[in-house]
């Protein structure tokens, strides 16, 4: 069967009818990150192939589709596949759903539709039967794997036994071996019975037969004891092996846990340091808002200084002018007249106004004592003197007023420039230094946060690596629960003692069985050596001997058939192992039959040492190799090939291994569909890496703009990258 | 044997058992000359013939009793 196309409609996150995957007959890669719909793709296929269910399930319906339906509207969930299997065929599985209320939906029955192309005709056939005919549950079990851990299906002895039974023809041998054994027994009974009734040898024959029967019972019991003891030994060995592995795993687990704790603590501390400064609060609390202020302050200071200087210069000039004006006023002196004889006359204020007015009123000069009648020269002189006095007083008052006015005059009415200058001065010094330091402080902080962020990234990378290591360890340990690894395994010594005792007893029992079988052989020879008188007895003896040999030959053929099958499976597995491992160490697969006829897969080094703890990727490659080999057998036995479908089967692989691995798989002539998050880093496909791949690659991802808390907003979109 | 059915593959696997060949007195070449299971059923060698009968009749769905009767009779008359 080669799948050519898969179509998914309204199945969970695959909203709508445009989700189509065209698959190659070799490798097809489907890349998606966590939550992008990888597992949903795989589960859609599982759902399609599951023919045991008959009802649709509302949980399978796209939440987005449900949310967009109006009450009374309906749609369908459908998964279909077109494939080549002895001609082109297709099968689809669907069910309808209808919105019946705000939160209620009605779900219809499941419909399986199949189509086969016969000649030019496309015929409708029963879809369920078509699936069962072309891709039955048994084949699905060995061709579809979800997660790396599921690959260990082959670790299950029952599964491998079924596989061997299915493909080695061993079941056909079972009936033949059983029949031949029954015939041998019956012929033996007939021969012995006839011998015991022979006249000549009956007594001796009866005696020997009695002993043979008794010995047969002893041998039967001994074989039973041996089988039980062998199972005990195997159980002890398995338990010990598991415990040893778990103990070592447990130690590694403790180490990983301790490293994880250390790194987690570092992460918390770094996150604390990174978040210790709230940038928004610091804008005001730490005046970070002023980080761009120093040049502004500088400009302000320069302008204040210039203004102050200019003002002072203007004031100085003004003062000079003012001083000059005052000086000019002050330099205006009274020019005193000279008397007849040249003597200097009295100052203008002597006699004073009161004296003058008294003398004028009294008409007498009280300086010289002569009368000064009104109208006389003397009177006029004194009157003139009084008026002169008054004009002097008036002129002086005027000058005083002018001087006062001059003195009161100032160039600048306000002190704004001084105020600005004072602010400028007050902002200098320590405060200026502080503001200048803010930008540096912010730069330092950002640099520190950058450094811490880088450190945090390194720590988070380490945590991721350690978690990967833990996952690999758990996968390697066979998905042992973590709780089991927490406990220590101290009882190994006791188990060793029990195993040793069982092995000693098993050796003893085998020795005892050998002795009994020798005795039986002697008795048989003695019985055969008897010479009966009846020719019938002789004939029955020959018949018995013939059937005895034939029964052994059938048993041997069955064993050889199984051995050959396992040998061929082993050889093919190792061919794949070598190819898939590229240049890595890969060891050698050995399929080993156990005492209870089951088969186990082991990995050995070429020097014969068993690799008891292969790495996660070694185990994965080992299982995939065996699965490829099994797939070859399905092709050989059923004359049809089957696809191998893996969901996240290579999570233990490193980046470097991915490319080689997929390139090798794509070069094999085997259809393989791998859904993986390989080649995706931080949500982006490493396009350069996938360019080196020679296979079709699809990218599935959540459509943007979704609300992470609302399923109804999530839809997977499918994009063919190459 | 160019194309071998499952019966013929099993017949060959059983008949080529060394111990049975020695007991039955036939060689690998004798086995190789058997074109199909019907030729084995026609063989004069009672071991070859009996093995072929067991395989054919078992796969035809004969009961153990039926087959025992047939085999026992055949061998009784031919050994």
Image: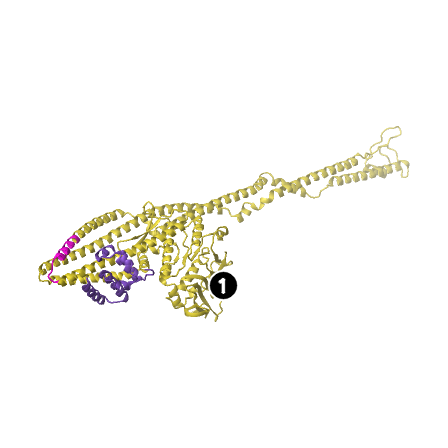
Chain colours: A yellow, B purple
Residue A173 coordinates in the image, percent (x, y) = 27, 60
* Chain under callout 1: A
Q: Quadrant of the N terminus of chain A?
A: bottom left
Query: Who's the residue at 88% across and 33% down the image?
Result: A370
**A169 lies left or right of A69:** left
What is the secondary structure assignment of the residue under circle 1?
A: loop
Residue A508 coordinates in the image, percent (x, y) = 19, 49
Please identify the residue farthest to the right as the structure is shown.
A376
Please indicate, yes or no, whether residue A598 appears anywhere in the rendered image. no
Is A416 above or below relative to B71? above
Residue A690 sits inside the magenta stretch: no
**What residue is pinned by disc 1?**
A18
Prevailing SS of the magenta stretch: helix
Please indicate, yes or no, whether residue A263 appears anywhere in the rendered image. yes
Residue A102 coordinates in the image, percent (x, y) = 46, 68
Which of the pair A474/A594 is nearer the observer?
A594
Which of the pair A418/B14 is nearer the observer?
B14
**A174 lies left or right of A427:** left
Count of residue discs: 1
Residue A403 in which image quadrant: top right
Residue A528 sits inside the magenta stretch: yes
Residue A696 coordinates in the image, percent (x, y) = 47, 56
Is A718 above or below relative to A419? below
Magenta-colored span:
A517-534
């Amino acid at each position: 069967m080669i799948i050519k196309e898969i179509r998914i409609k309204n199945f969970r996150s695959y909203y709508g009818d445009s989700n189509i995957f065209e698959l190659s007959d070799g490798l097809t890669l489907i890349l998606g990150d966590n939550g992008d719909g990888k597992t949903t793709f795989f589960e859609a296929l599982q759902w399609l192939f599951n023919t045991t269910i008959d009802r649709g399930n509302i949980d399978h319906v796209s939440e987005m589709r449900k949310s967009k339906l109006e009450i009374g509207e309906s749609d369908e969930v459908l998964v279909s596949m077109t494939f080549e299997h002895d001609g082109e065929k297709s099968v689809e599985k669907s069910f309808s759903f209808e919105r019946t209320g705000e939160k209620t939906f009605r779900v219809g029955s499941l419909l399986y539709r199949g189509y086969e192309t016969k000649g030019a005709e496309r015929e409708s056939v029963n879809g369920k039967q078509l699936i069962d005919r072309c891709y039955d549950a048994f084949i699905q079990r060995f061709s579809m794997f979800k997660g790396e851990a599921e690959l260990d299906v082959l670790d299950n002895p029952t599964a491998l036994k079924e596989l061997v039974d299915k493909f080695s023809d061993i079941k056909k041998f079972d009936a033949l071996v059983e029949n031949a054994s029954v015939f041998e027994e019956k012929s033996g009974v007939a021969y012995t019975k006839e011998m015991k009734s022979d006249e000549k040898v009956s007594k001796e024959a009866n005696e020997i037969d009695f002993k043979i029967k008794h010995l047969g019972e002893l041998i039967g019991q001994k074989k039973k004891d041996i089988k039980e003891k062998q199972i005990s030994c195997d159980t002890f060995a398995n338990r010990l092996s598991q415990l040893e592995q778990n103990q070592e795993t447990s130690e590694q687990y403790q180490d990983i846990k301790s490293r994880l704790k250390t790194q987690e603590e570092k992460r918390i501390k770094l996150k604390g340091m990174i978040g210790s400064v709230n940038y928004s609060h610091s804008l005001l609390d730490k005046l970070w808002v002023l980080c761009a202020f120093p040049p502004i302050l500088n400009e302000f200071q320069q302008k204040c200084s210039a203004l102050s200087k200019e003002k002072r210069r203007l004031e100085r000039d003004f003062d000079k002018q003012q001083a000059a004006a005052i000086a000019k006023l002050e330099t205006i002196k009274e020019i005193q007249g000279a008397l007849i004889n040249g003597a200097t006359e009295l100052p203008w204020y002597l006699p004073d106004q009161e004296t003058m007015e008294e003398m004028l009123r009294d008409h007498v000069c009280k300086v010289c004592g002569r009368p000064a009648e009104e109208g006389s020269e003397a009177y006029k002189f004194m009157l003139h003197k009084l008026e002169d006095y008054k004009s002097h007083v008036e002129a002086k008052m005027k000058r005083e007023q002018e001087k006062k006015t001059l003195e009161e005059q100032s160039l600048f009415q306000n002190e704004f420039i001084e105020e600005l200058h004072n602010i400028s001065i007050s902002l200098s010094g320590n405060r200026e230094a502080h503001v200048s330091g803010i930008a540096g402080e912010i730069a330092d902080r950002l640099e520190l946060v950058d450094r811490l962020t880088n450190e945090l990234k390194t720590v988070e990378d380490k945590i991721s690596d350690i978690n990967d290591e833990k996952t690999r360890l758990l996968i390697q340990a066979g998905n042992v629960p973590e709780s089991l690894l927490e406990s220590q395994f101290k009882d190994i010594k006791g188990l060793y003692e029990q195993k040793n005792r069982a092995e000693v007893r098993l050796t003893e029992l085998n020795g005892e069985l050998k002795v009994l079988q020798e005795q039986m052989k002697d008795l048989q020879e003695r019985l055969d050596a008897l010479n009966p008188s009846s020719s019938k007895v002789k004939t029955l003896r020959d018949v018995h001997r013939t059937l005895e040999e034939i029964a052994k030959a059938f048993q041997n053929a069955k064993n050889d058939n199984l051995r050959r099958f396992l040998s061929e499976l082993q050889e093919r597995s190792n061919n794949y192992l070598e190819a898939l491992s590229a240049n890595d160490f890969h060891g050698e697969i050995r399929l080993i039959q156990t005492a209870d006829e089951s088969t186990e897969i082991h990995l050995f080094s070429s020097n014969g040492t068993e690799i008891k703890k292969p790495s996660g990727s070694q185990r994965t490659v080992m299982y995939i190799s065996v699965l490829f080999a099994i797939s070859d057998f399905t092709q050989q036995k059923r004359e049809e090939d089957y696809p191998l479908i893996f969901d996240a089967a290579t999570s233990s692989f490193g980046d470097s291994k991915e490319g080689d691995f997929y390139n090798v798989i794509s070069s094999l002539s085997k259809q393989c569909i791998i859904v993986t998050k390989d080649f995706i880093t931080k949500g982006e496909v490493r396009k350069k890496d996938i360019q080196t791949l020679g296979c079709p690659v699809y990218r599935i991802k959540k459509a943007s703009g979704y609300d992470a808390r609302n399923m109804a907003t999530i839809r997977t979109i499918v994009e063919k990258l190459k | 044997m160019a194309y071998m059915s499952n019966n013929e593959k099993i017949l060959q696997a059983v008949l080529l058992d060394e111990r049975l060949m020695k007991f039955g007195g036939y060689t690998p070449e004798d086995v190789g000359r058997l074109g199909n299971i019907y030729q084995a059923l026609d063989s004069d060698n009672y071991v070859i013939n009996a093995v072929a009968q067991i395989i054919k009749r078992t796969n035809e769905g004969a009961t153990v009793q039926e087959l025992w009767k047939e085999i026992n009779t055949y061998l009784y008359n031919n050994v």
